[in-house]
Amino acid sequence: MFDNYWIMLEAADYLQDISPTKDRSACQLLIQPIDHDFFIMGLPLFKGYYSIHDMGKRSISFIPVASGKKPFLNKYKLPTKTLDRKENINDL
């Protein structure tokens, strides 16, 4: 969530097929450890979206690519509940 807008990230966004025949028999995880108190989302965050960087307004806008499966960003309120491991997100 960025400024109350949700950006869809899927597990596949953080995997890269490195098999010689591109049959997904070998994959690389696109997450690297860092020595900071924060997490850098990195390039996988942008997969499936066109992005517009506006330095004057200090903003980034996202729109899904026409051939992709990502949705338009929707504005929502901040979550008010923390999910327990046993809960299903669809039950909220």
Image (cartoon, rainbow, N blue to C red):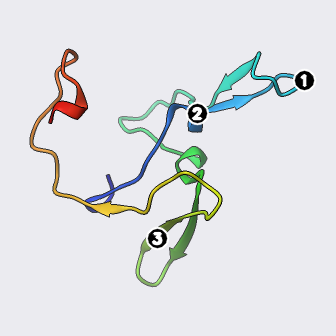
Count of numbered tags: 3
Question: Which image quarter: residue 82?
Answer: top left
| Label 3 vs 2, first from the N-terminus | 2
- Going by the numbered disc 3, the residue's amino acid type is Ser
- Return the residue at label 3: 61
58 relative to 71, above or below: below
Q: Seen in the image, is 60 located left or right of residue 1?
A: right
Q: Mark 2 falls on what kind of element?
A: helix
Q: Where is 19 relative to 68, above or below? A: above
Residue 38 appears at what percent x and percent y? 38, 39
Q: Which of marks 1 and 3 is in front?
A: 1
Q: Write down the residue under mark 2.
A: 12
Spatial separation of the CA atoms under disc 1 and disc 2: 18 Å
The amino acid type of the residue labelled 2 equals: Ala
In this view of the protein, which residue sits in the foreground, 23 or 49? 23
Under mark 1, the amino acid is Pro
* Mark 1 neighbour class, 10 Å CA radius: few under 14, some 14 to 19, many 20 or more: few
Indicate whether 25 appears above or below 35: above
